[in-house]
Amino acid sequence: MITSTASQESGFKIHDADDKQMRRFKTNQYLAHIHSRPDCVFLLRRGWVIRYRQLRDGRRQITGFFLQGDFCDVAWLSRQPLTQAFKAVTDVEAVSIHEGKFADMVVHRPDGMTALCNEIGLQSAINAEHCLTLGRKTAAEKLTQLFSEISYRLGAVSGTGSSDVPMPLTQQHIADILGLTPIHVNRVMRDLRDAGIVTVRARRMIIPDLGRMQRLAQFDPRYLAALRQHRLRNHLWHQ
Amino acid sequence: MITSTASQESGFKIHDADDKQMRRFKTNQYLAHIHSRPDCVFLLRRGWVIRYRQLRDGRRQITGFFLQGDFCDVAWLSRQPLTQAFKAVTDVEAVSIHEGKFADMVVHRPDGMTALCNEIGLQSAINAEHCLTLGRKTAAEKLTQLFSEISYRLGAVSGTGSSDVPMPLTQQHIADILGLTPIHVNRVMRDLRDAGIVTVRARRMIIPDLGRMQRLAQFDPRYLAALRQHRLRNHLWHQ
DNA sequence: CGTCGATTTGAGATTCTTCAAATCTCGTGG
DNA sequence: CCACGAGATTTGAAGAATCTCAAATCGACG
């Protein structure tokens, strides 16, 4: 999939007419179906996307989510059919980058390989943290871990920390991310609200004391360090 | 990290004196400590390795394991400090590949990028399946899923399916992989033994009816498809 | 105003954990 | 060859976290 093109001389330009294509998806629309073979990756400009795996009897596990600024999904570059589905949680705008173009960038840009590896490391760290959360945290820790990560990841891309954060996930989404039932999610959310930790309402969440919530979650942001110096991401984002 | 070397003309040769180094690790020895920054990846020749994340109060989650033929770990190519530890479960032999060498191979070999993406896709699929198992499967399904995956992954590299499979993990390891207590693992293993599904003894497991166990686990091997046509892996392995 | 999805609450059942302790296994030194 | 000791496995009993089933309420949108 490594091919030489004009970009080799001119340098990588995502905004060249042939290279850039803005795609829009409505809420609940699929960005990619399970078992499909996409020929591009998306760089999200706006909106939220979930990635999930499902069993025949209907049990669903959301294995990750993508926010503004995220790549969705580096794993699409593999030649294999997807083993997971990707669905828009909100309306989504994304720049599509053809796989050949992406490979060119990695090979020909001086820091292309570094940037790709950074992305791999970041996704790997996020997945590992998700496993830790699923396997070893209590329901209250799971909820606050999720909210802390969302707050941190949104803050990293917007550049501002805030106590009022977008939260378009339903309690069913949250349950499917954290391996709980929506009923139990609801009860723990009430406890967190009553304790003054976090209040979710009208697709936003209000966090009076972020440090307190992070402590409750045992949230250690070091696994997201790569977000702060993400060359590939920044390069594409700012064009 | 993309540097030009003689390998550009001569083609990639992992067995060149400078390029190849066999490393040995004893049981329970670390291949990489948390927060370290390895400058190479390992291709495992023999032995088992676990990757894990731990909370301050001691709770541990094993987020993945590596067997003969596996890369450990593509995420090390990121320039970030590791957020997980890597430890040998058995005595291990591994070929170490310097990060610069690895990048050269990806950039200069005709199918290097494809092979890297294959590896990324495979690891991503395995991680996602692990999340599904952790979040949405019962204890009996978790155990049989784990055993099915081990059997399949070992079979893919050894080329032979067998009802008698190496199993050096302790019940504590299994508990930390599956998000259970070792006590509960022990009880479910007794049930599985009594039901004639699988018997673990003396660091091996005996599976009288693999299909039956896989059905119980809801094991669908499609997420491991990339194992079957793994060019990078095969290329390095056979030199 | 009606409808559909999302949220909330109750009650009882189940899975899994915790704590405690006995037993087994296997490598090591005498 | 045997005794010892540390780690691993096994069992019991009680408790806690979470789930299932059922149903009422809320809220956004046409």
Image: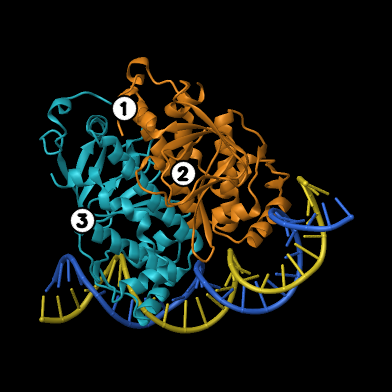
Chain colours: A orange, B cyan, C blue, D yellow
From what the image shows, is residue B120 above or below residue B223? above
Q: Are marks 2 and 3 in contact (CB under 8 Å)?
A: no
Q: Which residue is mark 2?
A: A126
Which of discs 1 and 3 lies nearer the camera? The answer is 1
Q: Which residue is mark 3?
A: B91
From what the image shows, is residue B141 above or below residue B32? below
Residue type pointed to by label 2: Ile
Q: Position of residue A193 (x, y in %)?
A: 71, 51
The image quadrant where one finds the N terminus of chain B is top left
Q: CA distance from mark 1 to mark 3?
A: 37 Å
Q: Position of residue B109 (x, y in %)?
A: 22, 33
Nearer to us in this view, A46 or B95: A46
Q: Residue at x 29, y 35 (%)?
A: B113
Q: Chain of mark 1?
A: A
Q: Which residue is mark 1?
A: A107
Neighbourhood count class around disc 1 (C-alpha, 10 Å): few under 14, some 14–19, many 20 upward: many
Residue type pointed to by label 1: Val
Residue type pointed to by label 3: Asp
Give the secondary structure at mark 1. Answer: helix
Picture quadrant where residue A11 is located:
top left
Q: Chain of mark 2?
A: A
Q: Chain of mark 3?
A: B
Which of discs 2 and 3 lies nearer the camera? The answer is 2
